[in-house]
Image: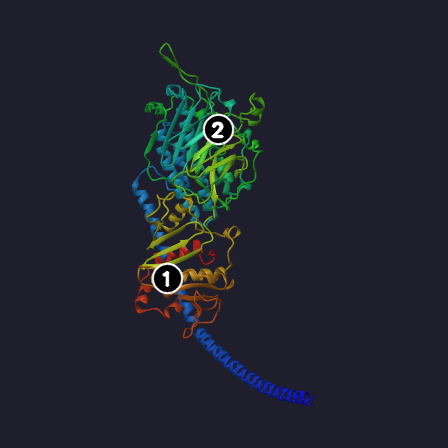
Amino acid sequence: MVTGRLRTAMSSKKGHKLTKAQRARQQKEEEERKQREEEEARLLAQRQEQERIEREKKLKEIRRLELKDEERREGELEELHHLLQENQEKAAQWKTNTAETIKWERYMRCDSAPDPTEQRDINTYISLWRDDPEVNITQVLRQCHCALQLTEELEVLLEEVSDPQEAQKFQESFVNLQEIIHLKHTLAAEEILKAANKNINPETENMQTEIADDNVTLSLWANLRKRKRFKGFHFEKAGLGFELPKSLAVKDIAVRILHTRYDHLSVLARMTPKATHTPTCSSIGRSKESLGGVASSVMEKKESLKGEVGESDEVQSIHGSEGGKSSESLGSSKNTSGSWESRRSHVLTQMEMIGADSDPTATQFTKTGSDEAVDLMKYTPLGGVFYYGVFHLPPQAHLVNHWEIREIVDSGLKVFLYNPEASSSDDSEASDSPHVGVSVMLPDWVLFLKTPKIALWDAAGTRWVGGVMDFTHQEAEAKVSFRMPSFQPFVLMQETYANLPFQSWELRPLSNNSAMFSIHGALLPLSITVQDNLCMLQSDQERGFAHILGKWMSRSALQRAMVKAGINIFVNEHTDRYVSTCRKDPNTELAAYEQMALFASACAFSWSRWNTKCGDEGLVMQVCEHLSPTPVPEGLWSLYLLGAQRVQRLEMTEKSETFSVDHHPGSEFHSTFIHMLRDRMSPEGAARTRKSGFQFVEAVQGLLCSTRPLRFSS
């Protein structure tokens, strides 16, 4: 009993001693913790003091750099202004001299082509051509080729003119030429159809022919057999087909599909539709002197006009695939009907609405589709216009006792009025569609980045509208098929900015006065080489624009050719409505392009992912000196921040995790981009920039300003 109590007391005393040891350890740990906290606080205060000293030092350095920049600002801005003004004056003088040379060369040619800048010459040219009774298709196409060259020149003049009166004069000449060209096509087609029964194909027992040159493809079909089971016909060489409603298969009709590589209807649609006079049926019957009367009423505003014509005036006749025909079947060389004046006056009234020589009742039967006007800023017509029309077959000649007898009519080629609703109600077989079927092989000189859309011409509203049905796109065959309410001109359309925004871009020098501008678009990468004042397109993709790849042309000519081929990388004041990207100050952006062009012979410039993160007022790009034509090594790039008042080199890199405006140690601030770049430029690079020609500088600047890669890149 005593032993147990002793053990308990000893155990209690021992536990008391362990508790004191623990308390001692705890006290020691507390002291150590306090020491650590004090040390950490001391170190934190030391770091904060160091950071404060560094900030003050950095602020002092920044202030020193700012004061230094302010001291030389006036001199730098004055030097930049002098460089830009000198180049602009040289470029303006060169353009003036070039225009005078072209005018003199035109004068020395002593041919019949008028000067497009002289409206009197154009009017005389049109008047003489209008009185020319030639209706042979080969000769007409050659004449039209010359006229289309004039329209192309007028388009360029309209893009460059600044005087509103001059713009109106050029527009009137442009529209008058459009009308006479279309008139001549109609008269030539009529002459061919008059001899349809002399050129019957033994297999189809109808007449069909295809005629083409560099500008148009004319496909004609005459319904001579009138089979009720006739479905349609496909023009093999032209890649065009049609399907007739059954009610038309037994009519005396002819189908014409005139495919023009140019687009005159979109030009009319862009010319202030509200101010455009739309002739009514009451105007039918006006005399030939009214040609061009409509032109003066639609000329209210200068617009950007698009178009291109071929260079060769050679005409190729393509015979129908089912059989051949003699050259005589294409029409006699002169019209001997004796009713030239009457027919011409009649057709002129149809010309009041270019493209309306298809069914004029077509617009009121577009109930199955959208009748809203197509936004020609959002969509671009590609591949030319397909004038799809049906006409009364002209009276055919008959042999009676070795005499050729043909009825003479004064109406000319008359449009066959087709009402699909009436046709549907009258047709006993409900399964037959009253709508007109069309199939088109996509032109191989146009690139469609997406599935094309179809727009129909609304002549009354002078606009493109929707309204097609049963649309199919066979991508492997590059073919589209659809139905439309009636016979109307139509176009293929693509989203204007399908290749925007750019994923990346780069401008790097190749040699003195030579550089390559590469863009990786949203759907298609491409490059443009600049040499002096000429540009050349390069791409691994050839389908659709092989005809312009590797060819040197002026920047403006290349831009028109690329847009016409469906490769649009160019922007305007409306682009931001359709392309969502970062916003940038336009003045800062323009100043950047001007200075990039000045140093494009010696410096490489590239896209930076930080450009979208630096705010609206700043621009960020990668830059380095590069005097070799080879690609730029990855490690040579430096980041630069351009603002409205200051340019600086950044300490951060393209691979940094966050954006920072800290300037690179050892670098300075400058008021201009070119003086900033000179700080690190070698003597060889500086010498190359001084040798940059004004033509090269203007070409690069124009390319940058027309694409705006700093604004429209993601």
Category of crowding for the residue at label 1, using alpha-carbon neighbours closer than 10 angstroms: few (below 14), some (14–19), many (at least 20): many
598 shown above or below 554: below
Tag 2: residue type?
A: Ser
Quadrant housing the N terminus: bottom right
Q: Secondary structure at mark 1?
A: strand
Question: What SS does tag 2 mark?
Answer: loop
Rendered location of residue 608, percent (x, y): 44, 61
Mark 2–mark 1 Cα distance, whole angstroms, equals 63 Å
| Residue 358 appears in the picture as rendered | no
Q: Are marks 2 and 1 in contact (CB under 8 Å)?
A: no
Residue that numbered label 2 is attached to: 287
Q: Nearer the viewer, residue 590 or 407?
A: 590
Q: How is the image coloured?
A: rainbow
Q: Residue furthest right?
A: 1
- Residue 604 has which mark? 1
Position above or below: 90 against 289: below
Identify residue type, mark 1: Ala
Mark closer to the observer (2, 1): 1
Q: Badge 2 local density, few (<14 within 10 Å), some, or many (20+)?
A: some
Between 67 and 25, the one lying in front of the other is: 25
Q: Is residue 110 above or below residue 201?
A: below
Q: Residue at x 55, y 27 (%)?
A: 420
In this orientation, does residue 684 appear? Answer: yes
Q: Position of residue 606 (x, y in %)?
A: 40, 60
* Camera-nearest residue between 370 and 575: 370
In percent of width and height, residue 155 lies at 42, 44
Q: Relative to 272, is 402 on the left or the right?
A: left
Residue 512 occupies which quadrant of the picture? Answer: bottom left
